[in-house]
Amino acid sequence: MGIEKTVEKTAVEILRRAVIYLPRDVKEALNSAYKDETSQAGRTQLKAILDNIKLGESGKTPICQDTGIILFFVTVGRDFGDFSFVPEALRAAVRTATVDVPLRPNAVHPLTRKNSGDNTGMNMPYINWDIGEGDYIEVTAMPKGAGSENMSSFAMLTPAEGESALKRFVIDQVIKAGAQPCPPTIIGVGVGGSADIALKLAKKALLRSIGMRHPEPQTANLEKAILDAINMTGIGPMGLGGRFTSLGVNIEYAHCHTASLPVGLNMQCWAARRATGRIHRDGTVEMVG
Amino acid sequence: MATFKFRTPVSETDVRKPSIGDTVYVSGTMITARDQAHRRALEHAKTGKPIPVDFEGGVIFHCGPIAVKEKEQWRIVAAGPTTSTRMEAYEAEFIEKMKPRIIVGKAGMGARTAEAARKFGAMYCDFTGGAAVLASQKIRAVKGVEWYDLGMPEALWILEVEEFGPMTVTIDSHGKNLHDIVQGSAQEKRAEILKVLGVA
């Protein structure tokens, strides 16, 4: 089998794993939330969520009917060689996965609302590119549901207000979103760069495991403080009241213009689906997450 | 908190029994409808064009399922609720004209829907968002699909369900809205939360 076909087949497998099996860190966080939740309504919701995860795994069925729009994060190793075929291979994989997994056909023209029927279309699936080491490409699939994605927001804050403005913005957005993003959520925050960079970093922050803090202590402490504050709102699982509104807050930042403070926010539902595989130049494949 | 089990068609007397926070299970027929289907149904009602299903006394499910066709028969693979807020623009008029008794979705609905539920005798229930496999286990059969031209998620799926639930009543027929109460209480805590965060 040529490398093109290997990438395509592996991507189908990555998509299948992503929509059926939640990452271990997400399952652990949901389990411990169920243990520690004190509200009866919250516990009922978390129990349904945990039962649903088990049923999905045992029946090899997508855990949520909203299998999202398909976003890929591809890191190309410097020794991988020609990778110009990758976009077409990933597109083909999405088409195959839509029928074989199956995925719900979600991709529509943004204005006519016509459904393409196979989850592909203009700029979709969307591929984020990165450069890495080694003789492999690493492909992460993030099927992103609309319930949480629709709660995304962006603000150009006042630099002089700094951290305070950021905290207020995040808390206000979480309260405003309420039950809509399917809490307990994971909150991705992108700070700095420019408008587009802040939102991109917010999404990228969601790829980080729950509980893995930002390497810099100042940012790590901010993540912890905002998470604790969010969980004081009492919105709780599915917005029916409880301690667990969010499971984690992940922040990524970029240096920005001295005159601006862009902040992007991207929410992820409890069904925080992502899966990663590596394809080496010689055709060997590893599933790494 | 009480538990209620209903079978379609649901009467106004029955739908007025539960209050917010109560648990509900339904058996019988459930019809999926999202924004596009709501919009088309109301347009058809206005222009006198036929509507392929009867919603009266029925259960509307805000859901776009994953369905597969096996030997000419549809099977629902996954069918959890979608965010109901998107239907807020249509639901009050829908309740008035189509007379469904139970609306099922997630994340709650607004004041107009709550008022229509109070006035015409209906309620809104939350099913756990994302719990699509759990939901599909309660679906016994697909009785039909209409308006498939809207796409798989937006079509009207006519489902036969058995003890679909547990659902939580979040808008009852007495004007109460549980999501509003939770969100209102979060809003009340906002100042204290910001203080803890050191925000002036």
Image (spheres, coloured by chain):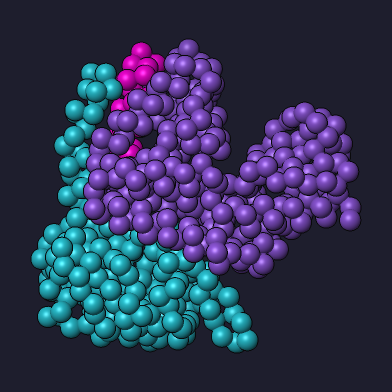
Report the quarter where the N terminus of chain A lies. Answer: bottom right
Asked if one can make out residue A61 in the rendered structure from this viewpoint, the answer is: no
Write down the region rendered in magenta. A158-177
Q: Is residue B57 left or right of residue B29?
A: left
Q: Give the vertical position of B195 relative to A207 (above or below).
A: above
Chain in cyan, by letter, is B
Instruction: Residue A174 in the image: state x and y as whole percent.
Output: 33, 39
Q: Give the vertical position of A74 relative to A180 (above or below).
A: above
Report the quarter where the C terminus of chain A lies. Answer: top right
Total count of labels = 0
Most common SS among magenta residues = helix
Q: Quadrant of residue B169?
A: bottom left
Q: Is residue B122 left or right of residue A10?
A: left
Q: For this rendering, which residue is in front, A225 or B180? A: A225
Q: Residue at x 49, y 64 (%)?
A: A55
Q: Residue at x 65, y 41 (%)?
A: A73
Q: Is residue A159 located in the magenta-colored stretch of the structure?
A: yes
Instruction: Residue A19 in the image: state x and y as whole percent.
Output: 57, 56
Chain in purple, by letter, is A
Instruction: Residue B62 in the image: state x and y as whole percent.
Output: 37, 67
Q: Residue at x 24, y 80 (%)?
A: B6
Instruction: Residue A242 in the image: state x and y as whole percent.
Output: 26, 45
Q: For this rendering, which residue is in front, B96 or A85? A: A85
Q: Is residue A251 left or right of residue B53?
A: right
